Amino acid sequence: MSKSASTSIPATGSCVPVDTVDVVLPLAVPGAFTYQLPAELAEQVVVGSRVVVPLGKRKYYTAIVIRRPGTFPVDTEGLKPVADLVDAAPLILPRQLDFWRWMANYYMCTPGEVMKAALPSGLKLESETRVSLAEEFTEEDEEALADAISKDEEDAPSAALQTLTPRQHILLQALRAVPAGKSLTIDELLKKCKAETGLLPALRRLIEDGVVQVSERLSRAYRPRTASHLRLAPDYQSEAAQHALLDALKRSPRQAEIVMALIAEPQLARAEVRRRWPGSESALATLRRKGVVDTFEVAVDRLTTHTADPAAARPVLNAAQQTAHDAILREWEEKDVCLLHGVTSSGKTEIYTSLIRRTLDAGRQVLYLVPEIALTTQITTRLGRVFGSDMGVYHSKFPDVERVELWQRQLTSRAFPLILGVRSSLFLPFSNLGLVIVDEEHETSYKQQDPAPRYNARDAAIVLARLCGAKVLLGTATPAVESYYNATVSHKYGYVALTERFGGVQLPQIFVEDVKELRRKKQMTTPFSPRLTQEINHALAEGEQAILFQNRRGYAPVLECRKCGWTPRCTACDVPLTYHRQASRLVCHYCGASYPVPTLCPNCEEPSLHAVGIGTEKIEESVASCFPAARVARMDLDTTRTRSAYEQIIRDFQTGQTDVLIGTQMVTKGLDFDRVRVVGILNADQMLSVPNFRAYERAFQMMAQVAGRAGRRGRQGIVVLQTRQPDIPLVHQVVAHDYAAMFAQQLREREAFRYPPFVRLIDIYLKHRDESTCAAAAEAFAALLHPHFADALLGPDSPAVSRVQYLHIRKLVLKVALDLPIQGVRRTLLAARRALIARPAYRSVNLFFDVDPL
Ligand code: ADP
Ligand code: ZN
Ligand code: ZN
C-alpha cells in the first residue's frame, strides 16, 4: 500500500514515466510513501539506504528506501522528489527490513513506528531533532578546525575534519554561533544556513564524527573519535640528526625537552604533551613550523572494548553442564529454539559461553540478549573477560553517538561477532547471525510497553533468528509459562534441564513466617519477623550479607488521614500518590509528577496524615534502627537513575562494602553475589494483589529468583518468606522449589479461564481527554467488533488505573481462538479502527493494540 507524499496517483492524465522509490518515514502513518527519484541519485540509491525527503510544507525526514519499483508513468505533479541521498550503501540490511515488516504486521503498528524504535536518533534525523556542537568540541578541535579551514598549515588535518566540505563549514559556523548549552532544531539550523541541498548528509557526517551531537537527556562524557599525536619528522629519525638538533636547541630548553621526549617515545599524544609541559603550545608550534615535529591523527574508538583474560578464555564445564550443553546441540538438530531450564547458579552462563565460542569459531555472529540494564554490568564483565574485543555492547543508556558508531561498525568487516545488548539490539544489522541467547527469558522487561511497537524481544528474537537461519537458546531458572508449554507440552521448542547448582551447593532452605499470626502475638514489632531478624544478625556476625526484597519503592505507598480517610491522589492520573520521605515529596508512579507533602489534611485540616504500607525507603530506615552496625544500600528506580549509580551499588555489595541490600524486583534479577547468606521476602502477598492473570506466575518467578541469590557459593543459603497466607499453594511451591507444580496449576487455570497459551490475547486500548468520548468510542468499537468475535471480545472496561496524564482509558480484551487465522483477525481489527476514527466524534481518539500483552 503506497501513497504519494501529497496527493494520490491518478489513473489517467498527463503522465510521464519517472523513476520512483518507496520509503518508510519514522511516523505512525501506515504504509509506505512514494517519491520521485531524481536522475542524479538514481545510480546510488539502493534498498536499505537513507534518503532525505520532504513532507508537508517545511518538514524534512530521514527515510529508509524499502523498494525501488522502477520507472513507471505517474503524474509528477503529485509526486515530490527525494531531496537528498544519505547513504550510498544500505544502512538497513534486507533481512532487517523483513524483520521490520514482520514486527509491524504482528504487533499491529506502522513500519515507521518500528523504524523509530530500531534506529538510534543520530541515524534518523528529522526536522525536530535538536543538535548542538559536541560539548568537548573545544580547544584542540577548534584549533584543528581552524587549521583545516585556513589551509595554510602543512599539517594533516584531523581525520574527522579532513573531509570538511563547504557545507560542513557552513553548518559548523552556524552551530558555533549558538550559546553554550543551547541547541537548535535541524529546521532552525537549516534556516540559518540558507543553503538548499546537501546539508543533511553533511550534518550526518558531522554527527557520526562526533563533532555535532544530537541532544539527549542521557549522555555520558563525549570522547573524541581521533586524537592528535606528535612524532619527529622523518628527517630527524637518525641519531646523528637528533644530536645536531638537540645541539641547535640548547637555548630553547622547552623545545629540547619535547624533542627528547619524542626520542624516548616515538609518538606522544598532543594532550599528553600539554599535560606534561603546561604552556608549551608556542614551543610546539615552533617545532612544527620548523618541520621538526609532525602531527598526525590516531583513531580513538569511542566504543568500549574489552580485554580477554586468557585464563577465562575457555570454560571447563562440569559433567552436568557438559551433558546439558550436548543435549542443546542435539535439540538444535531438530528444532530452532531450545529452552535451557537450569536452577539458579547451575552455570547457565558457562554453557552460554561455550555455545558462543562454538558459534564464533564457526564464523557466525551471536546476539546475547539481557532483559535490561540491571543485568548488563555483571554479564559485561564476565563475558568481556572471555571474549575481549570480539564483544560489543549495545545499550539504551549509552550515548546515542556510541550506538550510531556500533551500528555503522556492524556494517563493516570489523563488525563485532558478539553483541551483548538489551531488546533494541535486535534491530542491529547482523550479516551472519548464528545464535541468539535470550537470558532470563521469563523477564517481563523484554516487552516494550510504550510506545509502539509493543513487542516482546524474546518472541521477536525467535522470528529474527528464523529469518537469519540462526538458533535460539532461551535460558532461565523460572521459565515463562508459555515457554515451558512450548518446550514440554507442544514440543515446539527443545527442552534441556539442569537441576543441580554448580559445586554441589544446595538450593536455599526456605522458612515461611506467618505475619498475621505473629502480629496477633505482638511479635511483628518491625517489618522483620523474629526469624528473619535472627538470620540477619547471624549473617552480619559472620561477615556475610543479606538481601531484602520489598517490591515497592518510596517510603509508603499511601498517605492517609486518620480522621477523615482522605488520601492524596495525582491530579493527572487516577492513582494515589506514593510518599517519598527522603525527597520529601508525594510522587505519582504513573506520570512522575511530584507534589509537596501537606502538613495538615487538606480535607479536614487536622494534622493527622500518616503513612500506610511499606516501601523500600521505610525498610532502609528500619534496617538502620534494627541493625545499627549494618552498612545498607537500597536499589530501586530512585537510586539507580544513572548507570554509574547502579553500577556502584552492585560493586559495593559485591566487594562487601555494604552488608544489606534492599530492593524492589531489581534485586531478583540474575545477579551473582558470593556472600549472601540470607534473603528476606518481606511481603509475598502484595505480589498476588496485582489484577493480572500472570500475577501468580510472576510472584513465583520473583520469589524463586530472589531466593536464588542466597548461598550461591559455599554453603546453603536461607530464605525467610513473610506472608499472611502461609497455606496457599504458591507458598508451598516456592518452598519446595517446585516449578512443575506451579506450572501444572497455572495451566489448569489458564485453560479453564481461557488465557494464553490456550488463546491469543490482544488488548485494545482507547485513550481520550474526555471521559465520555472515551467511553462512547469504546462502546462503538465493541459494537463494530461484536459481529466478528462475539464472546471472544470482553469489555469495554475501565482498567485498574483508568486515567493517566489526563487521558481517560478504556480497555477491551480479545481472546482469539488459536485456530482462527490471525491475519484475518488483524485485518478486521484495523478495518474497525479505520471505521471508528472516520466518525467525526472519534477522530481524536487514540486507539491502539497490544498483542500478546503481559
Ligand atoms: P546461572 O547463570 O545458572 O545462575 P552461573 O553461570 O552464574 O549460574 O554460575 C554460578 C557461579 O558458579 C558463577 O560464579 C560461576 O562462575 C560458577 N561456575 C559455574 N559453572 C562453572 C564452571 N564450569 N567452572 C567454574 N565456575 C563455574
Ligand atoms: Zn500522575
Ligand atoms: Zn482529614
Image (tube, rainbow, N blue to C red):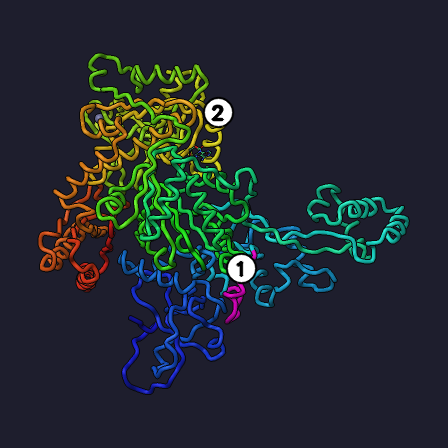
Q: Quadrant of residue 141?
A: bottom right
Label 2 SS: loop
Q: Position of residue 293 (x, y in %)?
A: 78, 54
Q: Position of residue 687 (x, y in %)?
A: 25, 32
Secondary structure mostly seen in magenta is helix
Label 1 SS: loop
Height in image: 15 above or below 816?
below
Mark 2 Cα-neighbour bin, 10 Å: few <14, some 14–19, many ≥20: some
Q: Nearer the viewer, residue 320 or 572?
A: 320
Sooner in the amino-acid sequence: mark 1 or mark 2: 1
- What distance separates the C-alpha of mark 1 from that of mark 2? 43 Å
Q: Nearer the viewer, residue 490 or 175?
A: 490
Please give the residue where the numbered disc 2 appears in the rendered image: 656
User: Which stretch did the figure color magenta?
Assistant: 191-209
Q: Quadrant of residue 847?
A: bottom left
Q: Nearer the viewer, residue 473 or 519?
A: 473
Left or right position of 454 against 154 = left
Left or right position of 580 against 272 = left
Q: Position of residue 397 (x, y in %)?
A: 45, 45
Please give the residue where the numbered disc 1 appears in the rendered image: 413
Left or right position of 658 against 223 = left
